[in-house]
Amino acid sequence: MTRLSAAAAHIIKVDPAFRRIVDSSPTMTVRPEAGSAFESLLSAIVFQQLAGAAARTIHGRLVTALGGAPVAPESVLAANPETMRAAGLSANKLAAIIDLAAKFVDGTVPTHDLNDLSDDEIVARLVTIRGVGRWTAEMFLLFQLHRPDVWPVDDLGVRNGWARIHTMAAPPTPKALMVLGETLSPYRSTAAWYCWRAVASTPIVPAPAPAARPPVRAEGRRRPSPRKKA
């Protein structure tokens, strides 16, 4: 095994159950989402509740309608809403994207000094955007900004991975997982990545109860004939 990163070494030290998944996984690599912070969040909104292929098609049409990449907030605010809607956006997603652009332009979400804000400050600003919840904000922190201590306890993959790593019968609740992960700080982003790795191929599901076995009849034996009445 190659030399462990500081994050992996800390995780194994405070929670040895991670040893197996760490040893069997490649070095953690998190590539940032393409484009700017604004483009990353715009993409996240487009992809919500859609299959990947359909979302990519709509996203491509939207970028084309806005004049091509890179897409700036000002381009969204200057565009005809019906033109954007024609790309395949629902009314709710169109409203969310317009609100996202407005929040970037008015400074609610700063475009240049995000690194000066704490994780909680960024989440608090992002969730004011229509269509952006805590999970979307946390994925933005982890994948776009590479923040090291993000712990997305509402993510089912993280919860299932924790259950698999710790051989639990069922995933912990988000509240319980928040407490369980406290010792992993300040490397909870890495721990979340290992949890995703643990269920990359086989998700955790409650084990089914064993089926009742049918009674076994001895082969070659005949049932006794009923006794005749005298």
Image: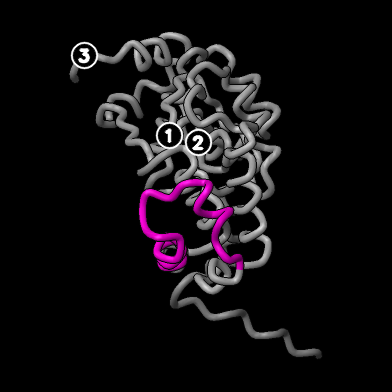
Give the percent coordinates (x, y) of residue 140: 50, 36
Q: Quadrant of the C terminus?
A: bottom right
Q: Which residues are magenta?
A: 57-81
Give the percent coordinates (x, y) of residue 18: 41, 23
Q: CA distance from mark 2 to mark 3?
A: 29 Å
Relative depth, front residue between 202 and 98:
98
Q: Secondary structure at mark 1?
A: helix
Which residue is drawn at the image coordinates 56% and 56% (left, top)? Answer: 78
Q: Quadrant of the N terminus?
A: top left
Residue 140: numbered disc: 2
Residue 3: numbered disc: 3
Task: Name the N-terminal-most of marks 2 and 3.
Answer: 3
* Residue 26 is inside the magenta segment: no
Which residue is drawn at the image coordinates 62% and 61% (left, top)? Answer: 94
Q: CA distance from mark 1 to mark 3?
A: 26 Å
- Considering every residue shown, the one lying at the far right of the view is 230
Q: Is residue 72 above or below residue 211?
A: above
Tell me the crowding category of disc 3: few under 14, some 14 to 19, or many 20 or more residues within 10 angstroms, Cα based.
few
Q: Amino acid at mark 1?
A: Gln
* Residue 71 is inside the magenta segment: yes
Tell me the crowding category of disc 1: few under 14, some 14 to 19, or many 20 or more residues within 10 angstroms, Cα based.
some
Q: What secondary structure predominates along the stretch shown in magenta?
A: helix
- Find residue 56 and report its image quarter: bottom left
Residue contact at pointers 2 and 3, CB within 8 angstroms: no
Q: Amino acid at mark 2?
A: Phe
- Find residue 64 and report its image quarter: bottom left
Q: Secondary structure at mark 3?
A: loop
Tell me the crowding category of disc 2: few under 14, some 14 to 19, or many 20 or more residues within 10 angstroms, Cα based.
many
Q: Amino acid at mark 3?
A: Arg
